[in-house]
Each structure stands twice: as structure tokens, then as C-alpha cells.
Image (tube, grey):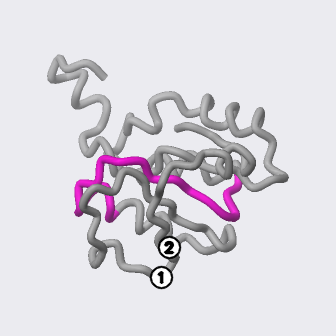
Amino acid sequence: MKLLTSTEHEANGAAAVTLSNDADPMAQDLTGVLRIDLHFPKFTDGRAFSQAFLLRRRLGFTGEIRATGDVLVDQLAQMERSGFDVAVLRADQPMATAERVLASYPGYGVGRYQGDAVKTAPHFASIKAGQPA
């Protein structure tokens, strides 16, 4: 998962579709969309997790899904498992701590014991089948 500061996010001028927290991803026309920004208005509101999961699993969206808003370090592992590619950290969240958190779960994002939004089969199933992890 790529981590950005809010300044880096604002400097990245790539066109994106921003879905409000109450928007239904299933009702969106995503033809030609390369990036979707999902917003966390407060850290206790997890609807963007569900939106990311729906975009990846049910709609097969392969573009970038970016978490914005009240993004805390302790949410990063779950964001990665839900289908987010990029997280824009809240201004008071230290980048070094965020990197350490993600490094603490090697293989977690690839579903070592459970599948996730991106890789539905658990990691051990790929190893058993002789496929690269």
C-alpha cells in the first residue's frame, strides 16, 4: 500500500472520481475511471471499507482506490485487505509509524490465512498449488 501525506495528495493532479460516503458503488458508471477516492469523514465511520470491497470484489475495479479524510495509522492493514491501494494520512499521523505498521504485517495484505478483496484465496493455497505468492 502506498502512503501519502495530504500535501502529496493535493499535488497529485490526476483526475479521480470521488464517491461520497453514502454513495452506492454498484450504481456508478465506472467506464474509463482510473482512480476512485473514498472518504472517511471520521475514523469511526467505516462505510468506505465496504465501498472499497464492493468496488474490488463485485465490480472488478482494477484502478486505484484511495482513502482520504480521517485516515489513521491503525486502519491501514484493514484498508489494504479491503482493497485500498493508497492511503492519505491525516496530518497528525506520522509517516514513519504508518510504514512500521504496514511492515509489521508482511503477507497480511496478501491474505496469508484468509482471502481479502484483492486476492480471494489464502496465501497458503497458492504455495500449496505451486504458484508464486
Q: Residue at x 74, y 47 (%)?
A: 7
From what the image shows, is residue 43 above or below residue 87?
below
The secondary structure type at the circle numbered 1 is loop
Q: Residue at x 54, y 45 (%)?
A: 86
| Residue 15 position in % (x across, y down) | 47, 55
Q: Which of marks 1 and 2 is in front?
A: 1
Q: Name the kind of residue labelled 2 in the image.
A: Arg
Is 125 or 99 nearer to us in this picture? 99
| Residue 78 position in % (x across, y down) | 52, 52
From what the image shows, is residue 69 above or below residue 34?
below
Q: From the viewer's perspective, tell me whether residue 104 is left or right of residue 66.
A: right
| Residue 4 position in % (x across, y down) | 66, 42
| Residue 95 position in % (x across, y down) | 75, 38
Q: From the viewer's perspective, tell me whether residue 83 is left or right of residue 1.
A: left
The residue pinned by badge 2 equals 47
Q: Are marks 1 and 2 in contact (CB under 8 Å)?
A: yes
Q: Residue at x 15, y 23 (%)?
A: 129
Q: From the viewer's perspective, tell me whether residue 103 is left or right of residue 73.
A: left
Q: Name the kind of residue labelled 1 in the image.
A: Asp
Is 48 or 13 nearer to us in this picture? 13
The residue pinned by badge 1 equals 22
Cα distance between the residues tagged 1 and 2: 8 Å
Q: Quadrant of the C terminus?
A: top left
Quarter of the image where one finds residue 131: top left
Tell me which segment is drawn in magenta. Answer: 54-72
From what the image shows, is residue 36 above or below residue 80?
below
